[in-house]
Amino acid sequence: MTASLKSFNILLLILLPALVTGGLLIVAGNLSDGLRLGFLSLPGVIFTYFAITRRKTYWYIFSLLWWFIFLLDSLLRSSTWFLFSSDSEAYFIIEAIANTNRQEIWEFLQLHSVAVSTVFISLIILIALHSFAVFKLIKVQHVEQIWQSKIFRSFIILLTVLSLTSYLMKPSRKVHPLIFWTEYQTKIQDFRGRVKQHKNVHKQWDLSAEKNLVMTRQAKGKQTHVLVLSESLTSLNLGICGYPRDTTPELNKRLSEIKVFCNAFSPSPSTINALRVLLTESPASEHKKYSPESVLAYARAAGYKIYWLSNQDDSYLSSLFGSYADQAIYKNTRSGRSSSSLDENLLPIYQQALADPVEKKLIILHLIGTHPNYQERYPTTFNKFNSNSNDRVESDLKARNIDPWIRSLRNDYDNAVLYEDHLLAKMLDTLRADHLPDFRSFTVVSDHGNEVGHELDYAGHSPTTKAGYQVPVIMWSDKLNLTGVNKDTNLNTAELDQNLMHIMGLKDKSSSNHSYWLDQDYRFTPEANWPYWENKS
């Protein structure tokens, strides 16, 4: 027992830098990257082993440098979580760094020189103390004893496999300090170039809007228009659109007051390209081409205060749309769309925007919606559908031999839809409770759909199936005449900007006549390559 305990303590001492490396980031707030970084750091144990067994200077140096790099990396990346509760790749952090020059960096280091020096020196001392303990106290026979134990040997083999897997998998490999910070520098440079480009785009938007804006009688008076941009929501999973599960009980209660289109189609299966097309006149097929016109610019030219309230932190969208808004607030401070931040976090700032006394407001809410990881998109109180449901959906998936894992993801996805139904109803009711504006509207569009066992034994973005493109459009306004569910008419969501302008009473005098979603004679005019999922170029 004593020998086993001693072996355990020795193994723990050897693994301590790896545990601290991963544990620091985990404690700070990033579980996935903390685990990945910890596993990626494990080759340092080999350097430590060679230093113990071979007593060569270069192995000591390799060991010390390795752990210094990994511990410093973990410390730097954890600091943004401790200070800002945010990932270091978050938009506002990259923005701050991108807008910082060498003089500002030097001034910052001077201002915080004591703290920076203390942390740096402390790190060196701790590594030195640990190395001294390892190299002086642990002998070759101690290492041999550890390997002779079946339990410890199995544990070491498991760690080896996990480390190798981390190096083989690109998402994990990207967390490695040498790769992460190299790519981080690239991201900063790309951000600077993108922002500069987007600023020029914004100027063109303003010029076009000032030149071509026409305001109708409908544009007069106090107005509040709300646009909800959902994420990865396919209408194939909405109860109001005929889905066997009751995923939309709240919207169903309001069907006499809202209009729901079930056959709307996004021009793109990815967020960035979809929103670029939905909010501007950019063609879906030309990913790097910017339109000189945007609904945001026309709204601003018409005197609207624009809010960009987001539960996503995407640097591209933030610099293209968020930075153009009069007020941009990001509740999700983790970069990309991998966070567990719930969309309900937007409700307080949404209410504040509604309470703003300005005469005209365009409030854009960018949800994280039902984006994978689906289980992270709803609280436990909305965990209604599971493997025990034994309903038509579950039976159909089983009959088509859909993998149990995908069936489980379908349940999570439907729970996320159920939660979004709850939030959309709350957002609509909150808007309707405000009787001050002369005219209000509420529009919901998803950027794209999602495949969750609909056609493929697969879950996620899908450019090759209908579910990857088919989305709902939900509309309400004070002047809405047509209500209920439309399951027949095809809509092109690329026309969102035109329809939103029409609702606000704004026109572009240079553009030709359009048919709008609520028109009796609406004409479906899809983007090129329709149907997108069948005609891949």
Image: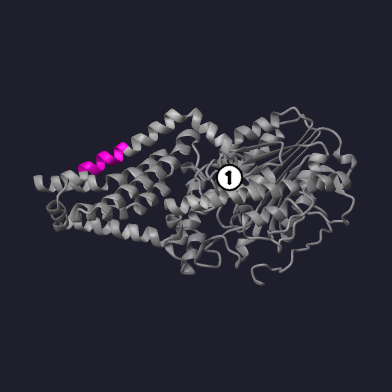
Please provide percent x and percent y for residue 236. 61, 59
Of residue 503 and residue 461, the one placed in the foreground of this image is 461
Q: In the rendered view, how is the structure colored?
A: one colour
Please provide percent x and percent y for residue 145. 13, 54
Of residue 334 and residue 371, the one placed in the foreground of this image is 334
Instruction: Identify residue type, mark 1.
Output: Asp
Identify the element where label 1 is drawn: loop
Residue 507 on the magenta span:
no
Q: Main secondary structure of the magenta part?
A: helix
Of residue 485 and residue 307, the one placed in the foreground of this image is 307
Q: Is residue 527 left or right of residue 84?
A: right
Quarter residue 133 falls in: top left
Q: Is residue 381 left or right of residue 266?
A: left
Please provide percent x and percent y for residue 200. 75, 48
Of residue 125 and residue 89, the one placed in the foreground of this image is 125
Q: Is residue 441 left or right of residue 175?
A: right
Please provide percent x and percent y for residue 377. 52, 47
Dot 1 crowding, Cα within 10 Å, few <14, some 14–19, many 20+ = many
Q: Is residue 63 above or below residue 466?
A: above
Give me the residue at 57% from left, 43% from top: 94
Q: Give the residue at mark 1.
A: 313
Q: Is residue 154 left or right of residue 489?
A: left
In magenta, the rendered stretch is 125-133
One can see residue 105 in this view:
yes
